[in-house]
Amino acid sequence: MKSHLGNRIAQIVPTLLLVSVLVFCLQQLMPGDPAVVLAGEERGDPQVLAQIRAELWLDRSLPVQYFHWIGNVLQGNLGLSWHIRQPVAQLILQKLPVTLQLGGMAFLIALLIGVPAGVIAAVHRNGFWDYVANAIGLAGLSTPNFWLGIMLILLVSVNLGWLPPSGFVPPTEDWRQSLATTIMPAFVLGNAIAAILMRHTRSAMLTALDQDYVRTARAKGLKESRVIIWHALRNALMPVVTLGALELGTLLSGAVLTEQVFSIPGFGKMIVDAVFNRDYPVVQGVVLVTAFLYVLLNLLADILYVVINPRLRAG
């Protein structure tokens, strides 16, 4: 197992290099000229455009631009934002805590709703609670996040006045207000993921409950709750862990629509603004950090496999 984890760690560098090549090449397909966008009112002056292109290395060939950028990245320098003239690493460090808080809360909500609902639906197969859980899961998958967010703002904020409709307050300033500003967008994000986790947990639990080791545990006279939690659920969590790592990576990469609806200054809003402003260094930096988070979460999922499944530890 140590060799397997070592191989996964060794794959991080080539994976990130491949991602860097892809994001650099794909962003060249974006319409428009960054120099024209940055020139503003002087976009008609060829001398100004030539100066901007020379300053940003846009007048070099694509391979030269890439190696110049990746060389700086390997030295810890993600570049300078073309639009607001701030270091990309500094911008990411400002937005990352916001996205971590929002994504962490959303994932916690998804776990608290999805996994228990999937277990209950599997235990009461084809019963009332199974139909209720499946109906709620289908509704969660079918409801657009932006629509649910707008409806919650109208109901909870405008009509009831319980929570602020938008904005973000860092927990270092006021943790109560920070929780109040993130609970609604976190619920909107966690709602859809909870539905996905519920369906996968139910499917995995149905498979586990039909296995011989579950029948053996019941034959030994163990309590039903112990059989379900310690025998069936532990083995059913393997595919759920994989799915959870992927979904958490999606949350940390930035939920664009939800952040736009609730005016949350996270990764999603930052990358949308960067794309519209042709701010290539910000786009490249955010995608590279997001890819690193995905790889890290998948590595964490591999470690959790060993913790959950004793057979892997024995191997």
Image (cartoon, rainbow, N blue to C red):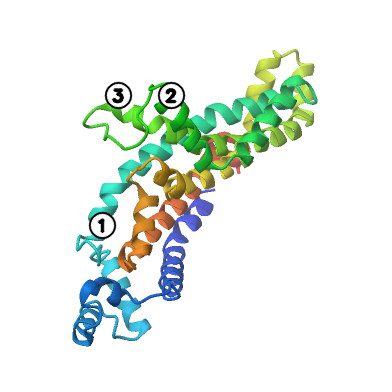
Identify the secondary structure beneath mark 3: helix
Foreground pick, 186 / 68 = 186
The image quadrant of residue 28 is bottom left
Per the model, the C-alpha gap separating discs 3 and 2 is: 21 Å
Query: For residue 204, which numbered disc appears in the image?
Result: none
Residue at figure coordinates x 32%, y 71% from the top left: 70
Residue 101 location, x and y as percent? 36, 37
Foreground pick, 201 / 255 = 255
Residue at figure coordinates x 72%, y 36% from the top left: 203
Residue 289 location, x and y as percent? 37, 56
277 horizontally vs 291: left or right: left
Q: Which residue is mark 3?
A: 176
Q: Which residue is mark 1?
A: 89
Disc 3 residue type? Arg
Per the model, the C-alpha gap separating discs 1 and 2 is: 40 Å
Identify the secondary structure beneath mark 1: helix
Residue at figure coordinates x 53%, y 53% from the top left: 4
Q: Which residue is mark 2?
A: 159
Foreground pick, 268 / 63 = 268
Disc 2 residue type? Asn
